[in-house]
Image (cartoon, coloured by chain):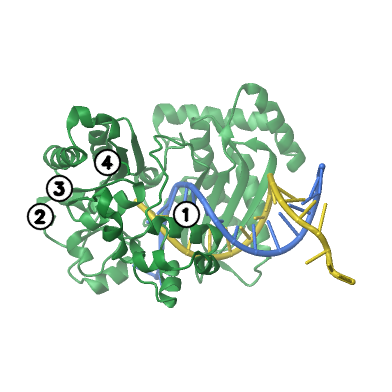
Chain colours: A green, B blue, C yellow
Amino acid sequence: MGEATMLHADLDAFYASVEQLLDPALRGKPIAVGGGVVLAASYEAKAFGVRGGMAGRKARELCPQLIFVQGHFGEYHRLGDAAIGVLGDFTPLVERISIDEAFADVAGCTHLFGTPLEIATIIRRRVREELGLPISVGIARTKHLAKIASQVAKPDGLVAVDPLGELEFLHDLPVGLMWGVGPVTEAKLKGEGILTIGQLAQAPGRSLRGLLGEAAGDKLAALAWNRDPREVEVQHRSRSAGAQSALGRKPATDAVIKPTLRHLADRVTSRLRAKSLVGRTITVRVRFADMRAVTRSMTLDAPIATAVTVSDIAEDLVRSALADHPREKTITLLAVSVSHIGEQGDMQLELPLGLADERLRPGTRPGLARLSADRAMDAVRTRFGRDAVGYAAAQLRRKNSVPDDFRSLAEKDLG
DNA sequence: TCTGGGGTCCTAGGACCC
DNA sequence: TCTGGGGTCCTAGGACCC
């Protein structure tokens, strides 16, 4: 039986806490960051049932006195980095999983800083004193249990799970707290009378597989017994990069689709090029008025990272999706993503790119020319900022669209 | 004026290969 | 008499996470 050295640290209601930090008049009040959609809610707002991702209108119905505030996204970036940086003062074994959340394995530094409990206490105190933010920490032997412990600890708490009492701690909790159990899985389990993690642990493996599929069934069964072999992964490269844009209700016409795809392809490929990455699979997503969405994808022989090529392929894919749904005249979202990501390698790789473009779409410009055009644009942006130049960016400015600052906040480092 | 943006992983069927 | 069978890749859809 190992020691409980895994920490999971999670800033509480992060965006909302930052807003309450910046503006004392908001403290103790129900606030929501966002407008059309709630990006984050304070604990006071959560008490009314307001949740992240909820439509602003619905949130206002639940909580009429709810105060909507615009986000200070630069501050989220700075404070999130600073909080995770506090973990990094103890150990390099930090795995950041989002702007406001990270695992840290302190096994190698207890001789310097004390027990995991002492380390967690210092971390919480420092984040509170130096940054002014509440952060909850869970301590356990495994990642999954540490994460659950931090959820149980919220708000502004600390929970350590004794390795000898793991199953006692785990088995009375509701299945919905487990990683990988969302609304659909929770409902399926409920249908079988499985409400707690303990009941899940007792369920026959065969029936879980039948209910949830092979991988999910096996995974949940293992986690219910706290068999979680995952270790901290300090950095791993992204498998895909994408961009999307909610459009409101727009006609499914070239005038809407072309500039939007250009803009999205530009966003995605400039991020790839910045890391010298290329991708082989282009996927588009089209959402219709009733919120049903379809995807179309194409895998190329050779990887690409040029905006125009990705955009042209995306157009074809969107047309194909629309052709399969001829009655849909209105679209509400377009998305472009590039996967099968790999390293660009040396310039030798560029020549086949052009050839691949030619094979794919005869008569278009060679890939090399496209790439150099993109590189020139990258250089301008490096000097003058992201908005200095872009494909069709001007037409896309929408009053109620999400600010670019928020977009970059959500972007994972492609590393 | 319903419903953001960026990701990961899994499943299932068909193509293709040995 | 049935069905040979396993593996990989691609595509479309879906669940889930922050």
Q: Which residue is mark 3?
A: A21
Q: Amino acid at mark 4?
A: Gly
Q: Which residue is mark 2?
A: A25
Q: CA distance from mark 4 to mark 2?
A: 22 Å
Q: From the viewer's perspective, is the residue at label 3 or at label 4 nearer?
A: 4
What chain is tagged by disc 4?
A: A
Q: CA distance from mark 2 to mark 3?
A: 9 Å
Q: CA distance from mark 2 to mark 1?
A: 33 Å
Q: Nearer the viewer, residue A307 or A294?
A: A294
Q: Secondary structure at mark 1?
A: strand
Looking at the image, residue A297 sits to the left or right of residue A42; the answer is right
Marks 4,1: beta carbons within 8 A: no
Q: Secondary structure at mark 2?
A: helix
In the picture, the quarter occupied by the C terminus of chain A is top left
Q: Which residue is mark 4?
A: A80
Q: Which residue is mark 1?
A: A245
